């Protein structure tokens, strides 16, 4: 049972009374102290309570971070100092930070560095420990001296063998959702925004990039300086250290990657400028100056991570034909939805991802046409149907507005936020018309730039400025059913694809016994192949599997989406001819989207589970902790420990 803190309540009341004065009077002062772009818009949504932070932004909140750190690969540690400029709204005598897997060495306050008391208090799953720091009512600067632990979940330390070039080590961070606190002591909430600068020292053979202004060449002495002028939440602070190169793709875009990958990456993502132009035309200016992308080693657990100015991307989206660039369109769209206007809490996650999927598909429609986008929408709809079926149609986790209730947000955030969120916005578009909806979104991103957004705040704004009391329109949209109800409401848009209808005919032909080479699949896109593979029967004879495999070389496909979908059938039908290729894929690729379904399929029978654990024994060290936590749960930790130590 949680007992309310009366002092906390009284401080919040004081803050509410002073809020109008602070917002109007402190904007100029904040901008003078921080030199930020957009800081004048940054507001803290006091109606949204983030259960995953110890910070109390209504009392004392950070506004700027100066980070001075050294990266030590030998002991797998980052050490240094985090200096925060703070605003003590309520003139309290303590400020609170989030930490996890971090050692705090000392804390000082003020420009003069006066020593002060601090304490690490308690521990909660998925939150770590609360750092309490004694301050004075007039304190404006807090200096935290710290070092990370080797097991810090945000830090992925790679040996040279785990990189593509195999010559130098590599480090990258993954701070979303609540992992920034494991490499920087911070106020780690999506509703708390601050600017930052950084000085990072690394071995001189390596290069550093961050979600900030970035170098395009190596420093001679291994020291790099960064600045992020726009206020961002802590989960968007990112760092990558390695032996990589830069190649421009346009006047304000480019790619970083290891030497043998950079040319292919620049070719694959050569449409970055066109994508940026497409979104700007629809929803207003790109506010982050540059948009660069870094291709990380294969262990990266996600398709992409939308770190401002520098998207982190998996090499699995390099297919050689730009067929998987919708992932990049998605991460770019976050420059408006998610990074510019950010969900206030992880319960409001759909505010980030539903909007972003919607924007992503508008980009793809601009570049490749409506028929291409209808394929993307239908694949997303199929994924959503599968998720709802698995979770149960009445499960509260199928609501857009979530109630995570202390669960690990990384495990609880599903594609409901992505696909159901995008469908809801599609419903609104169809109800009000695309032109009117686009005008609304453009104004929305402008009005709430560099602010946090709760579900309730968004819905209030939409009712006030878009629906405007039109009862018939409100009934047509059916907001409550979409946002606060389970499953898919009755007014869910019908998603169809004429190109998939042709593929459906090919499925019927092949399952009826026709030869694979007669299907006309030579010109299929990745999405058509996915639709075909997803709609094959569960039971296929070895002879038919062999015929399909030999016709299209599926077991050796260089397209990660296609080969992962094919391997599901390989496992289901014990097509052991392809088990070597399956093992090679699982050892090489660390993207959780592919790993989890394949290990789940392997775990369904005792024989295949032993195969899966044997593969995992070889692959586990190549995976990020985010992936290993998931796979440990799928295979069963006791079974893994027993078989991994044979």
Image: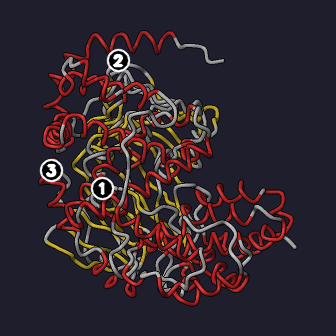
User: Which comes sooner in the sequence, label 2 or label 3?
Assistant: 2
| Secondary structure under the numbered disc 1 in the rendered image | helix
Is residue 31 among what the camera can see? no
* Residue 461 image position (x, y, % from top left): 24, 25
Query: Which image quarter: residue 262?
Result: bottom left
Numbered label attached to residue 90: 2
Q: Which residue is mark 3?
A: 282
Q: The N terminus lies in which quarter of the figure?
A: top right
**Coordinates of residue 234 in the picture (x, y in percent):** 39, 45
Label 2 element class: loop
Circle on res. 360:
1
Q: Earlier in the sequence, mark 2 or mark 1?
A: 2
Q: Residue at x 47, y 85 (%)?
A: 518
Residues 512 and 30: in front is 512
In contact (CB < 8 Å): disc 2 and disc 1: no
In three-dimensional space, the C-alpha distance between marks 2 and 3, rounded to whole angstroms, equals: 41 Å
> Taking 205 as reference, is 199 above or below it?
above
Image coords of residue 211 (percent x, y): 32, 58
- Give me the C-alpha separation between circle 3 and circle 1: 12 Å
Viewer-proximal residue among 329 and 514 = 514
Q: Assess whether mark 1 and mark 3 are in contact (beta carbons under 8 angstroms).
A: no
In the image, taking residue 79 as reference, residue 522 lies left or right, namely left
Q: Compare residues 627 and 530 and report the one nearer the observer.
A: 530
The answer for how far apart the CA atoms under marks 2 and 1 are is: 41 Å
| Nearer-the-camera pick, 620 or 134 | 620
- 370 on left or right of 277: right
When asked about the image quadrant of residue 192, the answer is top left
In the structure shown, which secondary structural element does the residue marked by tag 3 occupy?
helix
Packing grade of label 1 (10 A; few <14, some 14-19, many >=20) is many
- Residue 84 appears in the rendering: yes
Mark 2 crowd level (few <14, some 14–19, many ≥20, 10 Å Cα): many
């Amino acid at each position: 049972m949680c007992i309310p803190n009366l002092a906390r309540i009284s401080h919040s009341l004081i803050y509410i009374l002073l809020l109008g004065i602070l917002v109007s009077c402190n904007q100029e002062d904040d901008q003078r102290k921080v030199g930020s772009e957009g800081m004048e818009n940054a507001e803290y949504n006091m109606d949204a309570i983030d259960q995953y932070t110890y910070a109390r932004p209504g009392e004392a909140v950070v506004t700027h971070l100066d980070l001075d750190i050294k990266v030590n690969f030998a002991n797998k540690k980052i050490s240094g100092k985090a200096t925060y400029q703070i605003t003590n709204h309520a003139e309290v005598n303590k400020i609170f930070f989030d930490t996890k897997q971090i050692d705090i060495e000392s804390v000082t306050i003020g420009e003069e560095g006066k020593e002060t008391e601090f304490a690490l208090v308690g521990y909660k799953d998925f939150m770590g420990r609360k750092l309490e720091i004694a301050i004075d009512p007039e304190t404006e600067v807090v200096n935290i001296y710290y070092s990370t632990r080797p097991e810090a979940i945000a830090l992925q330390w790679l040996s040279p063998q785990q990189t593509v070039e195999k010559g130098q080590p590599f480090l990258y961070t993954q701070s979303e959702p609540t992992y920034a606190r494991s490499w920087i002591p911070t106020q780690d909430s999506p509703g708390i925004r601050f600017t930052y600068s950084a000085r990072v020292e690394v071995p001189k053979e390596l290069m550093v990039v961050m979600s900030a202004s970035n170098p395009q060449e190596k420093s001679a002495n291994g020291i790099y300086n960064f600045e992020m002028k726009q206020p961002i939440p802590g989960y968007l602070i990112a760092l990558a250290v390695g032996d990589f190169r830069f190649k421009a793709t346009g006047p304000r875009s480019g790619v970083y990657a290891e030497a043998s990958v950079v040319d292919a990456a620049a070719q694959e993502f050569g449409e970055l400028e066109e994508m940026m132009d497409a979104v700007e035309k629809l929803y207003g200016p790109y506010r982050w100056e540059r948009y660069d992308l870094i291709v990380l080693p294969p262990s990266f657990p996600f398709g992409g991570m939308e770190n401002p100015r520098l998207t982190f991307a998996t090499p699995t989206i390099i297919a050689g034909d730009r067929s998987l660039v919708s992932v990049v369109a998605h991460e770019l769209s976050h420059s408006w939805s998610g990074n510019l206007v950010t969900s206030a809490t992880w319960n409001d996650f759909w505010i980030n991802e539903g909007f972003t999927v919607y924007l992503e598909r508008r980009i793809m429609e601009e570049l490749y046409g409506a028929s291409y986008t209808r394929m993307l929408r239908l694949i997303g709809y199929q994924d959503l149907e599968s998720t709802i079926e698995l979770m149960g149609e009445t499960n509260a986790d199928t609501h857009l507005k979530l109630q995570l209730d202390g669960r690990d947000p990384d495990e609880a955030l599903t594609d409901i936020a992505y696909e159901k969120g995008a469908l809801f916005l599609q419903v609104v578009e169809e109800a009000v018309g695309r032109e009117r909806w686009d005008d609304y979104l453009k104004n929305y991103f402008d009005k709430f730039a560099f602010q946090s957004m709760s579900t309730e705040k968004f819905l209030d704004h939409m009712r006030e400025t878009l629906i405007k009391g039109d009862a018939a329109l409100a009934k047509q949209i059916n907001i409550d059913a979409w946002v606060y109800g389970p499953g898919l409401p009755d007014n869910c848009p019908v998603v169809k694809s004429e190109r998939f209808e042709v593929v459906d005919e090919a499925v019927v032909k092949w399952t009826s016994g026709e030869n694979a080479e007669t299907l006309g699949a030579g010109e299929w896109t990745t999405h058509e192949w996915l639709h075909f593979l997803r709609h094959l029967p569960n039971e296929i004879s070895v002879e038919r599997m062999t015929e399909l495999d030999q016709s299209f070389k599926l077991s050796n496909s260089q397209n990660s989406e296609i080969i992962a979908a094919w391997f599901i059938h390989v496992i289901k039908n014990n097509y052991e001819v392809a088990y070597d290729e399956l093992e090679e894929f699982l050892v090489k690729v660390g993207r959780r989207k592919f790993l989890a379904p394949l290990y789940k399929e392997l775990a369904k029978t005792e024989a295949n589970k032993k195969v899966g654990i044997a593969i995992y024994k070889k692959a586990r060290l190549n995976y990020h902790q985010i992936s290993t936590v998931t796979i440990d749960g799928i295979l069963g930790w006791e079974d893994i420990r027993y078989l991994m130590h044979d």
